Image (cartoon, rainbow, N blue to C red):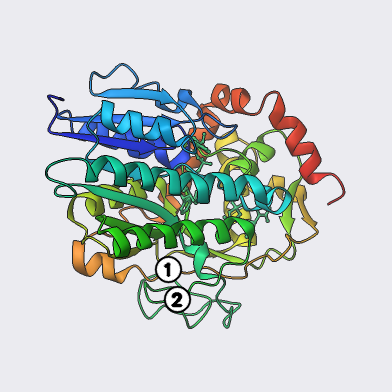
Amino acid sequence: MSNYKRNIMITGGAGFIGSHVVRLFVNTYPDYHIINLDKLTYAGNLANLRDVEDKPNYTFVKVDICDYDAMLTLMRQHSIDGIIHLAAESHVDRSIKDPFTFARTNVMGTLSLLQAAKVYWESLPEGYDGKRFYHISTDEVYGALELTHPEGVASPISAHEVYGDSFFTEDTKYAPHSPYSASKASSDHFVRAFHDTYGMPTIVTNCSNNYGPYQFPEKLIPLFINNIRHRRPLPVYGKGENVRDWLYVEDHARAIDTIFHHGKTADTYNIGGFNEWKNIDIVKVLIKTTDRLLGNPEGSSSDLITYVTDRKGHDLRYAIDSSKLKRELGWQPSLQFEEGIERTVRWYLDNQAWMDNVTSGDYMRYYEEMYRGR
Ligand code: NAD
Ligand code: TYD
């Protein structure tokens, strides 16, 4: 038996978004026990959670979510009543090289968690009452949108300009293109199937691209900040015209908190920043901001921009319509992009030791292999 009001398992809590969710829950809810389950792959890093690791309501367990017996044992041991599932392989370029790892963790790992939760919760006298299985997913499951306004036009739904006439809503048909998004789509279907078949109280959210502190520097924003600092080439895929909708990671964590507590069971919510950017425009903002914060003339790193072979199957445009979440639960992004980028660049420049740590050893081999021949 536990003395806590709630016992919540967060998977993938040592990763980028997971660490922000763990921090938010541990600090906001001292009466909840937060159990962080993470395998600590190359993307998991306990240094992301130094500030909460000694809190009495926090427990870390190094474990693979694909280990069904371990999942069931941990759920029983900690009387788990809520699961927030973020553990995943998350990088599209890696999924193109090695799709099996993505199917294993994202599909089989999610299934292993679902089945363990089902067996444990169904064994309790109250069954599924008061329980919640919250699956964190991505907008990439919806495929790609058309880029009908390459120069951008006024948005019908937000203050920021947009690059097309359509947006992903909760009713958009799934059409994943990359092995990453295919594996996430499959896991979303399993989660909904566990509600429809067994009555498990599930919830799914699909979020747009996140940015902010503690993101592994294989993703566009931290990779480019680090490369500008070290005067390394900035590999822009194709013509840099692909569009992404960017959300500050702490805003995503806040949305997860709101939805975990107030979201409707079996429902889906899209989470997005109403903040579309062409890659090349983001790169220019990163150059300007990083140059200025390093004390160099603004724009002096522009010579580092290097157009390289496009990503295979590169989705042209993602853009989320998150008005349902605003209308039903009152959430909206809190940070303007300019402020979020300033904070983010400053954080990476101020935390060089973190960057050096995660970019040592295996990382450099990965990096060299990824960009060899591009
Ligand atoms: P990340 O790669 O930074 O972190 C993933 C974490 O999962 C790491 O700590 C890793 O060690 C852990 N992990 C991987 N395989 C595991 C396994 N088999 N068992 C236990 N732990 C394992 O990813 P992220 O960017 O923080 O994304 C978190 C979740 O949010 C993912 O499910 C991703 O699909 C989703 N998402 C990400 C974004 C984004 O922009 N980053 C946007 C929308 C949704
Ligand atoms: P990424 O951060 O990998 O996120 P996702 O693929 O999930 O959207 O990439 C963001 C965009 O930046 C995407 O359109 C691919 C592009 N990109 C580059 O142009 N160069 C790079 O080195 C990387 C990592 C990404």
Disc 1 beta carbon < 8 A from ligand 1?
no
- Label 2 vs label 1: CA separation? 6 Å
Residue at numbered disc 2: 167
Q: Quadrant of residue 203?
A: bottom left
Residue at numbered disc 1: 320
Q: Residue furthest right?
A: 373
Name the secondary structure under disc 1. Answer: loop
Side of 92 where 262 appears, left or right: left
Q: Give the answer, above or below, for where 184 lies relative to 41.
A: below
Residue 24 in view here:
yes
Total marks shown come to 2
Name the secondary structure under disc 2. Answer: loop
In depth, the one of 88 and 359 nearer the eye is 88
**2 or 1: tag closer to the N-terminus:** 2
Tell me the residue at 51%/65% (across/down). Answer: 141
List x then y, in percent, for residue 21.
34, 39
The crowding category of the residue bearing disc 1, from other C-alpha atoms within 10 Å (few below 14, some 14 to 19, many at least 20), is many
Residue 214 in view here:
no
In depth, the one of 156 and 93 nearer the eye is 93
Q: Amino acid at mark 2?
A: Phe
